[in-house]
Each structure stands twice: as C-alpha cells, then as structure tokens.
Amino acid sequence: MAFVTASWNPFGDVFYRKFNLYSDWKMKEDLSNCLIAAAPYAGPIALMINGSHKERSPSLRPIMEIYSSSGNRIVSLPWKSGQVVHIGWTTNEDLLCIQDDGTVLIHDIFGTFKRHFSMGNEVLQNRVVDAKVFPTAYGSGVVILTGAFRFTLATNIDDLKLRRFPEVPGLLRPPTCWAVLMQDRQPKIVLATGKDVYVLDNASCTSVIPPGLGPQVCGFTQIAVSFNYKKLALFTDAGNIWMGSSSFKDKLCVVETNFKTAPKQFVWCDRPKSDNPTVVGIWDKLLVITGKTKETIKFYQDEDVHLVPEIDGVRIISSSNHEFLHEVPPACQDIFKIASMAPGALLLEAHKEYEKESQKADEYLREIKEQNLLFEAVQQCIEAAGNEYEPEMQKSLLRAASFGKCFISNFPPDTFVKMARDLRVLNAMRDYIVGIPLTYPQYKQLTIEILIDRLILRRLYPLAIRICKYMKISELQGASRILAHWACYKLLEYEPRSGEQVPLLLKMKRSQLALLKAIESGDSDLVYTVVTYLKNEMNRGDFFMTLQNQPVALSLYRQFCKHQEPETLKDLFNQDDNHQELGNFYVRSSYSNETTIEGRVAALQSAVDEYNKAKNEFAAKITEEQIKLLRYQFRLQKESGKTYLDLSLHDTVQALLLDSKHKQAEQLYKDFKIPDKRFWWLKISALAEKQDWEELEKFSKSKKSPIGYMPFVEICVKHRNKYEAKKYVAKVSPEQKVKGYIMVGDLEQAVETATERKNENELNIILSKCTAATDQSIVEKINRAKAQILKK
Amino acid sequence: MTRLKMAAHLSYGRVVLNNLREAARKELREFLDKCEGSKAIVWDEYLTGPFGLIAQYSLLKEHEVDKMFTLKEGHIPPAEVKNIIFFVRPRLELMDIIADNIRCEHKHHGPPRDFHILFLPRRSLLCEQRLKEQGLLVHFTHIEEYSLDLIPFDSDLMSMEAESAFRECYLENDQTILFSVAKGLMTLQALYGTIPQIFGKGECARLVANMMLRMKREFAGTQNQILPVFDKLLLLDRNVDLLTPLATQLTYEGLIDEIYEIQNTHVKLPPEKFAPKKQNESGRDLSNEPKKLQLNSAEELYAEIRDKNFNAVGSVLSKKAKFISAAFEERHNAKTVGEIKQFVSQLPHMQAARTSLANHTSIAELIKDITASETFFDKLTVEQEFMSGIDTDKVNSYIEDSIAQKEPLINILRLVCMQSVCNNGLKQKVLDYYKREILQTYGYEHILTLNNLEKAGLLKPQTSTRNNYPTIRKTLRLWMDDINEQNPNDISYVYSGYAPLSVRLTQLLARPGWRSIEEVLKMLPGPHFEERQQLPSGLHKKRQQGENRVTLVFFLGGVTYAEIAALRFLSQMEEGGTEYIIATTKLINGKSWIKSMMDKLEPSLF
C-alpha cells in the first residue's frame, strides 16, 4: 500500500501516473512498419502491416490484423484490395480502410467485409494524400486531403453526403499539419501551412492567429485537438507549444521544449474538469508531458509506441506493453498523497488498524468525526475505489467505506452499492477474454447500454445477458434484445434453408445480411423480396449504393425496372456511368415513347451523345445517319404524300427507284455511302420489278457491273422474261455461263460453252436438264463431247 | 387406355422417365382434389403446350375440371363452377391480369366462388406481394406451386421449355432459371437417386452445381435411399459452344425443326403432300389446314430415322416401303382360317406402319425440295467453309449478296455470327461493315439486336491477335473430312462434317477424360470442375459385366436436335460404354435461338 504513489509523477499541484493495463501484453508486430489505429473507449486495435516486410511472404500483400485491447489477435488477413492510406475506427467499432483512390472499405471487428463506398470522383481523380476518421454527433465522419490539396468530407458514413471544402488560398503544398474539429455540430478543419493557420468550414476559409504567441514563430509543425474538441495545441518549429482553446480565443500557455523537430505524435492528455491539462509528444522513444506548469515529465520507452487519446488520459501501445497514462484522479490523490490528512485517507487508515484489531482505529475515526467529515470520508473512499485499477485496492477502499458507513446513522446506500456493481462489471470487462479495459470515467461516458452493444458485437452473448440481469436492465433493452442478436447469429450459422432464413433476417431488420443470404441461395424470388424491402426502407441514394455492390441483385432489379419502371432504369445506368446502355435506353425510348418526329430525333440525339461517351464510334455514327434518314424521309413524305418513314435506307432507295425517282435514289446512295454492289442489286431488282427492261439494259451498259452479269440473268428469269435474260448471258463470267444458258433455256449454247470449256461436270448438269423426248440432239452432242474429253 | 398409350414411349429407355411424369401427374391430382367441387382452369397460355405432355384434358376432367379459359383481362367467361383456378407462371404482369379478373367478378356480383392460384414452377413472394398491395390476396383459398421443372419429352430427353433461358443467363445476367434447373435436378435425384459425380463447364454450370450442393445441405438429415440410376451429371453452358446451334442441322429431325419448327414434340406441316383427310361431318374441306403430327419414339419408324443424316433417310424409307407392301402381299398366301385370323390381328399394326411410312415419305419429299435447291447448297457451302476455317477473316461475298437481296435477317445473322465465332471475333473493319450493311438494309431498329449478339459473345471484334478457333478445331477434331452419312462412325455425320463441340466434350469426358484436353478447356469460357456427392453406404452400385454407365447431360441455354442425335449415336456405339440422357432448358435451333436474342423496335404511330 505504501507504494501506491511510487508510480506517481508530480506535475505542479497534481500527479500523473502510468501503469500497465495487462501484465502479459504482447503484440508480435513491430509498430514502425505499419498503419495502426485503436478505437477509443478501450476498443480494438487494427494494424495494416506493410507487405514489403522482409520476413513476410514474397507476395508483398499487406496484412490486416485486428487485436483486442488485451492483445488477443482476433484476425489476420492478407489485404486483397488497393493501396491503403489511412485506417480508423468508427464509433460503432467498424474498421474503415481508406484507399488512395478514395474507396473506403468497411470491415467489422472480426475482419468480415461489410460494404464499401467511394468518396467521389474528384477524390478518385486527384488521389488521397491523407485522411482521417473522426467521431461526430451523427456517427462517424471521414475527411480526405486530395492530391489537389482540397478537403472532401462526409459527416456520416451511414448517410453519405460528400462535401468539398473551399480552397485554401495559395496552398501549393500539402499543409504541414491539420486536424478535424467539431464546433456546433459542424465539422471544421484546422490546418497550418508554414506560419499561417486557417480554419476551414463548409463555406469559408478563415485565417486565424493563436493569441499570445510571440512574433518569432516561423511555422507550425504539429497540431493536437483534445478529445472533446474544446482545446487545441500547436507545435512550432522553434520548439514551443501553444496550448489554448480550439476557438483560438484564449491562450492556456506557451511552453518551451527545446525540441527543434516536430514530435512523431502529439496528443492531449486531459480529463473532464481538469485544471491542469497536458499534451503528450513522442520524440523517437522519448515521451514528454508538458502543460502550464514549468515542469515536464519524461518517460523513456524501450520501443516504438503509439498514443491513443481517451477521454481521461492516453493509452500507450507498443509491442510489449499496453499502458494507461493519466492525471491521478482527485479522490485518489487525496487519499494516497504522502502525509495526506484528507478524511478518506484517515478512514482508510482507521480501517487498516481495525483489521489489525488495533485501538488506533478508534483514534483515526474520532479524528474524522470531530471534524464532522465522516460522510466525506466514505464518499472519498467510494470514489477512489472507482478510479483504482487493481481489484485488491478497490476492495480495501470499499471495505474502508463500508466500515465508515457503520458510524453514520443514515448513509444513503445506493452510491456504495452502485459503485460495487459498476466495479464488478468493469473488472469483468477488463478480463483478458473480453479485453475492454475501460476506466470508470470512460465507462460512465460510454453508458452501460453501449457497453452491452459492444459485447454483442464481440458475440459475448452470455456475458452480456448476465450483466443485464446483474445491472437490472429491462428485458426489452437487455436480455431479449441480446437473445435476438444471438438468435440472428445462430440463424446464420445453423439455418441452411435460405427460404426460412431470409424473411427472418428481414424481420430482424438485418436487411444487408438478408440480401447477401438471398443472393447466395440463387433464388431470385428471395432476392427480389429483399430488394423490394430495401427499396421501401432506404432512401434512393443508399438503395442504389447497396445494389451497386451486389451485381446479382442489381441485374435482377434492372430486369424489374425494364418492365415496371423504365425511368429508374435510366437512373441506374447513370449511376454507374454505363453510357452504352444509356444510349440503348434512348434508342428504345425514341421508338416506344416518342410520337413526334422532333421527339424521336431528340431521343436519338441523346443516344448519339451517350454512344460517344461510351467510345462506341460505330453506334454514334450509324445513329447520326439514322437521324439524317428520318429527317429526309419526313421531308419526302410531306412532299410526295407517300409513306417513307421507318423504311430502312435500303427500302427507301428501292421505293424511290420504283417511283422512278432515280436522282433522289442516287443522292441517297452517295450520301449514305451504300456499297456499289448493293446499289446495283437494288437498282436491277427495282427495274425488273417495274418491268423497265429498257432502263435495265441502259444501266447494264452504264459501266462495268460490280456484281457481274449473272444477277441480270437471274432477275430477268425471276420476272419471267427469258428474252431479256438472254441479252446478258454472253456477258456472264465463263464459270457461270453454262448455268446462265441453262437458266434461259438455251441448252444448245450451254453445251457449246461446256464443250469449249471441256468441263464434264457442266455437261452432266446439262444432261440432267434434258428430257429424252425433246432434247434428243442435245443429248447426242453431250455424249459426243464427253467422249472427246475422255479421249484426251 | 389412351393415357397409357400416350406415355408408353417414356417407359422403354434405360431410365424410366415415365416415373417423372407420373410423379408430376400425382402432384397435379393432389392439388386438384384440394379444391373440392367443380372447377374451371384459367390458363397462362404459354403453359398449355408443355403441360400437354404431362396431362391431357381427360385427366383434368376426371378431377371435375369442366371448363378451361385463356387468361386475359376483363371478365372470366361465365361457368357454373365452384372453383376458379389460375395456372400461371410467376410473373408480375400476369398478376395484374388476375387482379383485373377478380375485380370484374366482384363488380358484377358473380356467384360466390373459390379462387386459387397454382404457380408453375414456383410460387413467388413478389407476385403474392403484388396481389397483396391491391388487397386481393385474401380472396384466394389456395396459393400453391407446381414444381414442374423438367418435362419428359422422350425416353431419353427432358426439357424445361423456358424460351428465354439463354437470353436471361447470358444477356441479362438473370439467373432465375438456374435455380429451377437446380430444383429440377433435385427432383430428379429424389426419384432416381443421388448422382455421385457432377462435372461441369461454364459459369452457369458452376452456379447450378453450387446450388445443388447447397440444396442438398438444406435437406441434411434426410438421406436418399434410392439406388442411383445416373452415374454422372454433366452440366454444360451453351456459351461454351456457341458454334453448334448456328450450323444448319442435317439430321432428319434436325431438318424438320429447321424448316417447320417442332413445338413440344408437335409439328405443323403444309398439307399439300399429305393424302387428303377424310371430310368431316360438316363436309368442310380441311385440306387447307396444316397437317399436325406428333413426333416421338412411340412411332417406330420415326425412332429409326430421326437421328440419321437426311441423305441416309431415303434408302431406309424405300426399304420400309418394300417390306410393308410385302407384308400386305402376305394376305394372298393366307389360306386357312387360322392364317387369315393371324393376318387380320396384325392388320392394325401394319396399317399404322403404312400411315407412318406415308407421312414420313411426304415429309422427306418436302425437305428434299429445299435441301436440293441451289440456295440451300450455297448456304451450306459457306457454313462448311467457315467451320473448317476457310476465309473467316474477311467479308464474305455470299453474305454480302444475301444482304443485297434482303434474305431473311435471321439467316444473315446466323452466318455472320458463325463467321465471328469461327474467327474468334472479326476484325473491327469487317464487323463494322457487316453491321452497317445489316442496319442499312433491314433497318436501324435492329441496332439493339446487334448489341445483344455482341453481349452474348456471338458477334465480337477481334481483341487478341491470336485466333484460337483452329487450335480448338484441331484438338477436338471438330472438322472431319471423311464422313460416312449412311453408316456413320463419328458424330460429325450430324452436320455432314462438323462434330458438335458440346458433344465432343461429352465424348471426351467419358473417355479418356478431360485431363487430356486441359489446354483447350482453358480456351473455352468459364471454369470446368468436378464435384462428388457422398452416397450412403450400401448404395454404391455394383456394375454388371457389360452394363453401361448412364450420364445425364444438361445443356444450360438450349440444345439442338442434331446434338441430341449425336449423343444418341454415342449411346449406341458398342464400345462406348455410356448411355446418355439429355436435359435442357429449351430445345432450340439456330433460328429460334437467334430470335430469342432479338429486340425488335417498332415506332409508335404518329
């Protein structure tokens, strides 16, 4: 007992102490080679270990690890996503990993991926230089410093609204230091660039000057904001620390440190209602505590440390120690300060003597009583018990209080009982298995309800229920709620029938999980059910965002929209910049929704724009041509009174040719670059259909036919004009000539040509066309020719 | 009697698929009996065709179904029945029609009736929600599902007849049908035992296998105690083999389907070549109505010729003709009363054989008219050039000319897609040229169709410089130069030279196994895998000497008759050792397949 104060360090009127939270704490990782983040309120610790570490596998993939505050490794996973710039915990103990492309991935405490979101296009383009996660009145926020030295911020990641803060004039380099503040529920950013300090908010950028700082300052190199956002500290390159209010209205003090370099980490070590707040800095392995008194406290640490500010102190994490540093709470100071005559100290002493059955007990007791301070003495002991970490110490203080109580006639019992209960809970929390080493002030701030949530989060259901019963929390808030969570967890683990699982999950409001499970089942009906539910429950932005991460659900919803809500379909395509599909959407709408030529053209024009954005040159060009054609047809229709609209280009030309509008047909042929071959086909079939044999012949002589002359023969025969057909047979290519003659029925010529070509195969074909009765002479000719060929 | 006859062909095969049909009929009867009293069925029209293969009107009538109507908006026609049952697919638009029907009934204070819905193949929360929103769900006494996933078509063939399965899976990323596939396979396993080995190739195959294994877990605790009938299940994605359906099928059944389209085993043919029907009582001449025939293995002659190359059909038919007339001649030899009696007893069978012969001779003539034409020959030549890898990298003049003459668009699309597939994508210039020609000739409104074909991978720009089709063709021996159409020795006879890739993969899986073709499998899309399902001890089959293994091949996204023919050919090969049972989401041919991917836009009137 006498050594209680051995670890105390005097600091002005008060003392600071540092002690181990767990005696056998061990974290294998070397903290210098990783990103680290610890959640406040004795929360879990996450590490993102750099992949280039020598001992690691050659894969170079970073490793993500999560530890409880008792050093229990919960999970270790290779990181498979992109380059992570910053990690941080939300107030719900979800881990945010912020990538350099502005994507933020959310994992739970077990390292299970929950979802991701993006900090927007601007961030994607300019990349992330630095980022911070911060608690807000609404939940947790994220702020990004981009490569363009602009800040993009979201105050609540569960209701993502991105805000881009105004530019800082003349900022060409990243700021030397910056921090987030919350004032009047609004986020602000304090940043220093050289000797200038600015406060940024949603609308403005204000230059501020910390009051009471001499003109010798050249630059600010570190910044620290207190846990409650009320106080702020700046470190200057001259080695001074300015401490004051975060509104920059009041100065607390300026301290000289003699350090020229900025500390590696710089945090407040404060407690509510403290008169003597301090800041803690680390230079290499030296921990320095400074404040308004002239003294400083220094600790030499054996290894790299990481500081975690808490509401009533600072956690100090290193590979082999997990310590807590704080100002010794007043009740403890009063009782344990050397030679203290405080009533609590006397009561503790009295009880000690009483245990030894010494009469001195009575002397001490009388002394308190004489001053009429027994009530205060008991109070002091109870309070001090709450602020001591060791159960043995807690016990002796409580025993002293209990002893003192006996001499007060009607001391209200609840403070004592309450503290005894609270301490049982706190000691249970501090157990290695649970690993939540909360201090009493942290516990009071957090509230028992949230503490229960954290146990649920850690799947410590039986403990949570026991605590609820012990603390007499109502069934609704306590046991039954926990059981629902437990049931849900078990449901996921042990209910294989998705048809049962999914509706239950929805009933339990676990919609994201329900969606995941529905997709896993492959049952579209289940997926639709969840999607419909989500659509009704969420705002549109969140709903789309959720779908964005679930391709299966997204395509099913698209199917649904296609039939039921075409306009939503457009929004969906817009959301993921699917310009090809947007183009298709406008094309479809041009046909099915528009009833005027202007409307149709306008829709097609929108399609052209989208196809261009999709870099689909072909589609853009052909759509432009369609617009041209539609306009042309519309004009033609008005002029002629005939229907041209919605004929294909090919059919339009054919219709023009049939109407003998050769000039217009030629014009289209040129304007739309119809290939020569097809135009010739078009023209000859149109002329044949009109029986305009004269024009056909003229056309055949206009220039050399790109399709040969066989089509002329065929088209004439098709229109039953063998006489005309014959005119073209002579021009047919030698390979097809025989076929041509057969077609026009001139077997004589066919035989002659085939004989000339010495082609037995062709002779046989002709033979097959002969009828014995009428073509006797031809048959003979063929046989003779065949014999001739054989001879050779 | 008729009922037994209807399904007799399902009982001949190695796997008695009639059990599946009987199970389906039992489920239907049970549902009908739940709705006591007289009934009228209101049909989702699409269901009637496939449904006919399970139950005829006679069965329904035995269970007091007095009336049948087609589902449409407005009033349900008057009927003196106690129950109205809607037989529908779970689709929202159909729910809206049902809602309209019900409202009409209420408005006009019809007689009190019980309403029921039977969903095929699955009830849907989404649909029920739709009715609930309109406050109509309470009016239904029974809402149930009739899980008719796989419908037996023949002794070795099952289909789900889901027409848009391929489109949904590969274009719209909607895998709803795969869930039904998995469910159907679970039903099949409940009837025919757990299938010990599952093989697969393709994304969808993987998903189906996953779902099956998952569903098996869901039933954990209840072990299937039936001795397995199937040894293996092979799941094949249609997009692993996009080429085969594009080629013109050259088997007898394949050609009937190509030209006249077989629907639910029925085909409608032009009546001219068939002997005029007897005039019916009213004296109306029916000769202008199409001739409707059912085609399945119940017809002996059809079973013999359907899978032959069409060029081998003629000789069989003439042999048959001689045989039958010889049989009829027998009557002159029948002298004694006993002999005459015997002859007469055979008469019905002989007459049936004669009708059958006459029918198929007529069909063969109809087909011959087409296959003997020059246009058919020219098109086939181009197809065969593409498949054997000739000139696939440049614009083909036959296609050009066909477009210029505005041949039916589907034929053009089939050829262009085939060229693209055989060249592993077309050069951008070539592709753009074709697309432009098509849109200029057939109309801009087909732009979405072209886009769909691109999405499905049927039409694509060449990305890598390497065309791996020749490697695939050579390794899998997809092109055989010496084929025997009359007495085939290889599956390539079904396309007169081209061996369907899908069937080749099936063949190689049986022997020597896929390990031998790992490299080629990697070139084809999607993963390939093998899963094993534990059998309860005691159900491990002890194979008899010479007993064939049975493999169920499931084509996800459709199968053609020619592929079926090729698999039947493999089943019959003496040294094969494997019999194949075939299942699919839909029986397809190139035409119906391409059609399912088309998006026809029509302008609103103005």
Image (cartoon, rainbow, N blue to C red):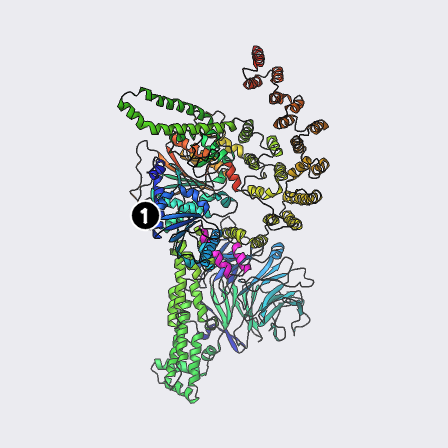
Q: What amino acid type is highlighted by mark number 1? A: Gln
Image location (x, y in percent) of residue A701: 71, 26
B49 part of magenta stretch: no
Front residue (pair B108, A177): B108
Regarding mark 1 in the picture, which secondary structure is present there? loop
Q: Badge 1 sits on which subunit?
A: B
Please report the bounds of the magenta region as a residue range. Answer: A522-547
Q: Main secondary structure of the magenta part?
A: helix
Q: How many discs appear? A: 1
Residue B559 can be seen in this image:
yes
Image quarter of residue B430: top right
A524 part of magenta stretch: yes
Q: Residue furthest front?
A: B282
Front residue (pair B35, A15): B35
Residue A492 can be seen in this image:
no
Image quarter of residue B373: top right
- Residue linked to disc 1: B223
Q: Is residue A665 toward the left or the right of residue A93 in the image? A: right
Q: Is residue B429 toward the left or the right of residue B326 in the image? A: right
Image location (x, y in percent) of residue A304: 52, 61
Q: Is residue B308 toward the left or the right of residue B23 in the image? A: right
Q: Is residue A197 toward the left or the right of residue B122 in the image? A: right
Image location (x, y in percent) of residue A608: 65, 47
Q: Residue furthest top?
A: A791
